[in-house]
Amino acid sequence: MNLFGRNDKPGEARSGEVKVGDAPANDAKTGDIKTGEILDPAPPKPHAPQAMPMPATIDAAAKAPPSSTKPTPAKTGDVMASVISKALKITGELESTEDIQIDGQIEGDVRGVGVKIGQNARVKGTVYGDEVELAGTVEGRIESKKVTLSGTARMTGDVFHQDIKIESGAYINGSLKPDMGKPDSRASDSRADVKQASSKPASASIVTPAPKDNATATAHH
Amino acid sequence: MLTLARKSPVQGTGHKSAHAAQAEAPASFLGSRVGIRGVLEVDGELVVGGHITGRIAAVRLVIAKGGLVEGDIVAREVVIAGQLNGRVFAPSVSIEDGAEVEGRIFHTNITVARGARVSGRMPWRPASYFETLTTLPEVRT
C-alpha cells in the first residue's frame, strides 16, 4: 500500500484525518463551520466573473488567470455545473446551491437544488433537492419536490415527493410518500401571515403620529 | 506511475470500471456553490471551486480561484490558485498567483508564483517518501 491508497481500514484512522462532524485537532477554524455556512465560502469572488457582464477588456484580463489554472469541464456546456465523476468517492456530506451531477459514489447526505444521479452512481444516504433525477442507485431516502426515476434507477428506501415520474424498469424497494414539502409550505405560509399580521400594527404605530391613534383608541374604549 | 491501492472487493470492481471509463470521463468539478464535509477520494483529477472541509486523495488536484480547502491533501500533483488551510503531500506542487496557503507542504518539486501568499513550512522530501508513505504523519501542535 502506498500514499495514494485508500485508507479503508477503520483501525488506521488517524487524528490527522478530518472526520465529518468533528473538528480536526490542528485547525480550530473548521470547527466553527456549520453545514449551513459551507454553502457560503468566504470569498464571494467566484460568482462575479461568471455572472456579471463587464467591459470586454477588463473582463478578459480578469478571467484569463483563473481559466488557465481551471480546466473547465467543457463537456458540461454552458454554465459550469458541478460534476462528481465516476472516479470520485465522497464519504461525508455534500451541499450545493447549484445543480449537480453525480456519477461517482457518495456515502452521506446530498443537499442540492437540481440533483442528477447518473447510471453508475451510487449514493448511500438521503438525497434532498428541489428536483432529483435518478438513473443510478440510491440506498437511503430521497426527499424532493420533483422526482424522476428512470428505467435504470435502483432505489432502496423511501421517496418523499410531490411530483414523481417513474419509468418502466425502475427498481423501487420502499414506499413513495407524496406529502413532501406540504406541511413545510403551510408552516411557512402561516409564519408569513403571522409576520405580516404582527408587523402591520407595529409599523402603523411607529409611522403614524400619536394623536390620531390615541383618539381612535380612546373612541373604541 | 503510482497506483491506487484498493482493499475491499466492492472498490476493486469500481476501480476497474473507473479505469475503463477514465479516458472519456471528465474531471470532477465542484463549483463555487458546492460545499463538502468529509473524505474525498478520486482516481483522477479533481477541480475544487467550492469549499471542502476534510481530507482529499487524488491523482491531480486543482484548487481553483475562489476554492477553499480545509484539511489534508494527498496527490501526485497539486495546483493551488485558491485558498488552502491544511497540509499537502504531493511530489509536484504548484502555487499560483493569488493563492493563499496556510500549512505545511511536503513536496519534491514546488513552484510558487509571485503574488502567492504562503505561510507555513515547505519541507522537501524525496520522491520515494511519497511512494512509501502509507499513513499521514501526525499533526504536530
Image (spheres, rainbow, N blue to C red):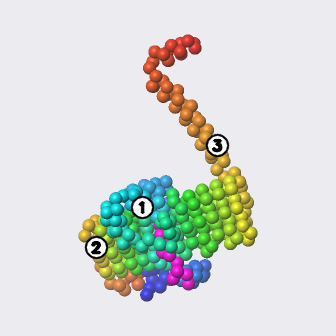
Residue B27 lies within the magenta run: yes
Residue that badge 3 annotates: A186
The CA span between labels 3 and 1 is 36 Å
Q: Position of residue A79 (x, y in %)?
A: 48, 64
Q: Indicate left or right for B96 with A4 as reference.
A: left
Q: Please state the horizontal and vertical placement of residue A59, each as a whole percent of the image.
A: 34, 62
Magenta region? B20-30
| Mark 3 in CB contact with mark 1 (< 8 angstroms) | no
Q: Quadrant of the C terminus of chain A?
A: top right
From this view, report whether residue A52 is shown above or below residue A188: below
Tags 3 and 2 both on a single chain: no
Whole-percent x and y of residue A55?
A: 34, 59
The answer to whether residue B18 of the structure is visible from this angle is yes
Please indicate whether residue A131 sits to the left or right of residue A66 in the image. right
Q: CA distance from mark 2 to mark 1?
A: 27 Å
Q: Which residue is mark 1?
A: A50
Q: Residues within 10 Å of mark 1 (few under 14, many from 20)?
A: few
Sequence-first tag of 3 and 1 = 1
Q: Give the residue pinned by disc 2.
A: B112
